[in-house]
Image: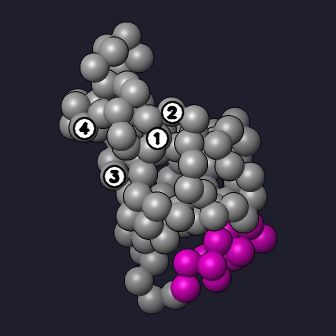
Amino acid sequence: CDFFMGGTPTKSESGYWKGDIKWLTISDYSNFDLISQTKDKITNLGLENSSAKLIKTGSVVISIYATIGRVGILGCEMATNQAIVAMQPYKISNRYLMYALYI
């Protein structure tokens, strides 16, 4: 797997928010969700000027702060905050990885 940590663009910089890039937080999903919607979106500028990264469709995500261990699969490309780790498996199925992480 390749692992990716997310990040949060500076909230006080309005040019970083309300863009076209979906930005995932723990409150946006439940266990075993296929995640396609987020409450917030960031701009390309917000992505470039933070530690947020664009994560590929099909990646497995797991929460590591607050609600620890919540797992899901990205139904589309999006960025995540720092409370979520994304994994892109290349030798096992993403569904298998998601369920294995939950156990």
* Residue 50 seen from this side: no
Instruction: Say what secondary structure mark 4 lies in.
Output: helix
CB contact under 8 Å: marks 1 and 2: yes
| Disc with the residue nearer the chain's start (2 vs 3) | 2
- Residue type marked 3: Leu
Tell me the residue at 45%/89% (across/down): 91
Is 67 positioned to the left or the right of 7 in the image? Answer: right
The span from disc 3 to disc 1 (Cα, nearest Å) is: 9 Å
Q: Is residue 3 above or below residue 96?
A: above
Mark 4 Cα shell of 10 Å, populated few (<14), some (14-19), many (≥20): some
Is 9 positioned to the left or the right of 60 in the image? Answer: left
The span from disc 1 to disc 4 (Cα, nearest Å) is: 11 Å
> Which image quadrant: the C terminus?
bottom right
> Which image quadrant: the N terminus?
bottom left
x, y percent for residue 5: 42, 49
Q: Characterize the magenta stretch by its predominant secondary structure.
A: helix
According to the image, label 1 marks what residue?
23
Residue at the bottom extreme? 91
Q: Is residue 16 above or below residue 59?
A: above
According to the image, label 2 marks what residue?
40
Tell me the residue at 44%/35% (across/down): 41
Q: Which of the pair 8/46 is nearer the observer?
A: 46
In reply to whether residue 70 is colored magenta, the answer given is no
According to the image, label 4 marks what residue?
44
According to the image, label 3 marks what residue?
54
The span from disc 4 to disc 3 (Cα, nearest Å) is: 10 Å
| Disc with the residue nearer the chain's start (1 vs 4) | 1
| Disc with the residue nearer the chain's start (4 vs 3) | 4
